[in-house]
């Protein structure tokens, strides 16, 4: 029985030393052992965007690894921030199809709209891209709501 | 003594990092395997690759935070004997970490011409 299984692994055609190399690499990377509890949690992969509302400005940080600044589009309309990004697929040097042993990253087309927590001056917004993070800083509009209107009783 | 206590207190109030398993693509080529990790907010200074007893650990500190806790990317792989550990190379660009793991010479396909 053991013998049968061993033969089946290699289609019964080649000894493990010749035919089994790809298989060996596959098993090497797939049989990673210590993912157990982590795989079950939500702490995998893509991070959500991070928004901070300060007194003077709203700062939004969006993880967009592997993009180029010119491939990212940032738009502000009223209090809605829209970010679009495309990631062109990296081609292998010889143009051949890549042989994936594992593929978790998505070939990316990202689009997200968020409602900002405060009114902002969209035309004064600035954006920068570093280490795969897009940071958008939006100055808040001065609000007069806090000023009390005193109404005189006549 | 007092200073020691102070330092300890400061350490205690530092928020614990959140460990996140980064997404990875693994591509096999003729000469080895390429691993591409998504590690936004990390760069060459914050990435650490370690191989011990055939277990490769990658970790990368990110500038991102999650609910006020610093984010650390971490993932382990078991390497086979067919890998040349000495020649593993790593580079980071735009929040993507690329690891090149070459096959050991004896694991490569050697074509021998019949004369």
Image (spheres, grey):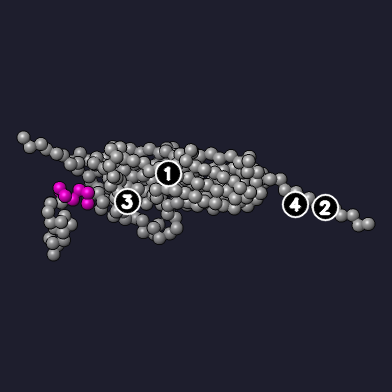
The numbered dot on residue A87 is 1
Residue that protrudes farthest toward the bottom in the picture: A1
Would you name the residue on which mark 2 appears?
A149
The numbered dot on residue A102 is 3
Q: For the residues tagged 3 and 1, is the chain the same? A: yes
Residue B100 makes an appearance in the image: no
Would you name the residue on which mark 4 appears?
A145
Residue that protrudes farthest toward the right in the picture: A154
CB within 8 Å, label 1 to label 4:
no
Task: Considering the whole magenta stretch, tell me its main secondary structure.
Answer: helix
Task: Of the two numbered discs 4 and 3 on the same chain, state the one appearing first in sequence.
Answer: 3
Label 1 CA crowd tier, 10 Å (few <14, some 14–19, many 20+): some
Q: Mark 2 lies on which chain?
A: A
Q: Where is residue A25 in the image (x, y as percent from the top left)?
A: 25, 49
- The N terminus of chain A - image quarter: bottom left
Task: Of the two numbered discs 2 and 1 on the same chain, state the one appearing first in sequence.
Answer: 1
Callout 2: SS: loop
Callout 3: SS: strand
The alpha-carbon separation of the residues under discs 1 and 4 comes to 43 Å
The alpha-carbon separation of the residues under discs 4 and 3 comes to 55 Å
Callout 1: SS: loop
Tag in front: 2 or 1 = 1
The alpha-carbon separation of the residues under discs 4 and 2 comes to 10 Å
Q: Relative to residue A113, is residue B41 depicted above or below?
A: above
The alpha-carbon separation of the residues under discs 3 and 2 comes to 64 Å
Task: Of the two numbered discs 1 and 4 on the same chain, state the one appearing first in sequence.
Answer: 1
């Amino acid at each position: 029985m053991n013998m049968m299984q061993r033969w089946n692994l290699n289609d019964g055609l080649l000894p493990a030393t010749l035919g089994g190399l790809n298989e060996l690499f596959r098993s090497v990377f797939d049989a990673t052992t210590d993912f157990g509890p982590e795989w079950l949690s939500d702490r995998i992969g893509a991070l959500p965007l991070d928004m901070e509302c300060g007194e003077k400005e709203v700062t939004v940080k969006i993880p967009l690894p592997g993009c180029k600044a010119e491939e990212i589009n940032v738009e502000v309309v009223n209090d809605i921030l829209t970010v679009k990004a495309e990631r062109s697929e990296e081609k292998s040097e010889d143009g051949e199809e890549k042989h994936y042993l594992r593929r978790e990253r998505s070939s990316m087309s990202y689009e997200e709209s968020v409602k900002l927590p405060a009114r902002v001056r969209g035309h004064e917004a600035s954006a920068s891209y570093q280490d795969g993070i897009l940071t958008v800083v939006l100055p808040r509009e001065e609000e007069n709501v806090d000023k009390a209107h005193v109404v005189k009783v006549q | 003594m007092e200073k020691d206590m102070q330092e300890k207190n400061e350490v205690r109030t530092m928020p614990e990092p959140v460990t996140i398993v980064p997404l990875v693509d693994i591509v096999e080529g003729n000469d080895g395997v390429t691993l591409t990790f998504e590690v936004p907010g990390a760069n060459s200074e914050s990435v650490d690759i370690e191989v011990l007893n055939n277990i490769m650990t990658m970790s990368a500190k990110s500038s991102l935070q999650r609910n006020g806790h610093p984010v650390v990317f971490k993932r382990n792989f078991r390497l086979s004997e067919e890998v040349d550990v000495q020649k593993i190379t790593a580079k980071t660009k735009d929040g993507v970490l690329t690891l090149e793991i070459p096959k050991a010479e004896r694991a490569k396909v050697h074509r021998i011409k019949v004369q």
